Amino acid sequence: MDGVLADSEPLHQHVIRVMLAEYGVDWDISRGDPTVGLRSLDGFEIICARHPLPHDARQLDVLYTARVLPVLRNQLRPLPGVPEVPRALAARGLRLAVGSSSNPEVIETTLTALGVHALFEAVVSGAEVARGKPAPDVFVEAAKRLGVPPGACLVIEDSERGVQAARAAGMRCVAIPCGETRHHDFSEATLVLSALPELLASPLFLS
């Protein structure tokens, strides 16, 4: 979802940087963000391990979620091909699901803001499964809710951890790097594209 359907990664990172700055932490991700692709709670556990903070990871996650929701409602922008590509896939009879590391409230707000919620038969949050990406749990659960075997699924991902999760689930995976993940290693991906609209004409999709 984040970085695939919506240009939301910069918004999430802005909220985190501002929040941490209030505690005297300069969260500099200019050399790469170690939390990309993780559940927000897992990300805050990394942050807490690196910086002394007045709250634990779970408290920070609650504060962050409360702050990011209005930002998403007011500033979220779709990435190229949204909503056209999901609509085209649904029209061709493909069954669609969202498997995201984001919290349920963030997923709900994002899909609603994009106007694509009704296109997805199943929506799974990383908070609903035992392990977050790069573990395969979120994608395995999405396939289960669709009633589709993992081997028949194709995952669209923007991060290295997401690709690893898809492959661990036994699924093919198309990687579409976003601005924040262009330096990631996508060697495990089945195919790498530069933008979502390319999916409709890709040999993998047509096959």
Image (cartoon, rainbow, N blue to C red):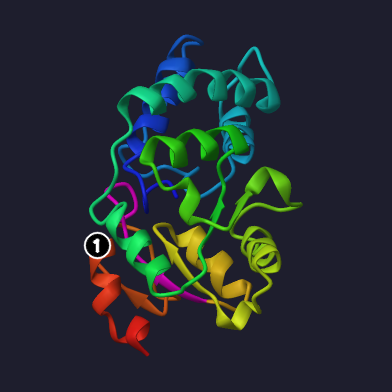
Mark 1 surroundings: few (<14), some (14-19) or many (≥20) residues within 10 A: some
Q: Is residue 7 above or below residue 134?
A: above
What's under tag 1, amino acid-wise?
Answer: Ala
Which residue appears at 29% of the width and 86% of the height? 203
Of the pair 188 and 118, the residue shown nearer to us: 118
In this figure, which residue is indicated by the disc labeled 1?
A: 195
Q: Position of residue 186 (x, y in %)?
A: 39, 69
Q: Secondary structure at mark 1?
A: loop
203 sits to left or right of 127: left
39 sits to left or right of 24: right
Q: Main secondary structure of the magenta part?
A: loop
Range of residues picked out in magenta = 172-182
| Number of numbered labels in the structure image | 1
52 sits to left or right of 20: right
Q: Quadrant of residue 158?
A: bottom left
Q: Quadrant of residue 159?
A: bottom left
Q: Position of residue 118 (x, y in %)?
A: 49, 50
Which residue appears at 37% of the width and 50% of the height? 5
Is residue 98 part of the magenta span, yes or no?
no
Which residue appears at 63% of the width and 40% of the height? 42
Q: Quadrant of the C terminus?
A: bottom left
Q: Position of residue 95 (x, y in %)?
A: 52, 69
Of the pair 51 and 39, the residue shown nearer to us: 39
Q: Is residue 177 above or below residue 100?
A: below
Q: Is residue 162 above or below residue 205?
A: above
Which residue appears at 60% of the width and 37% of the height? 103
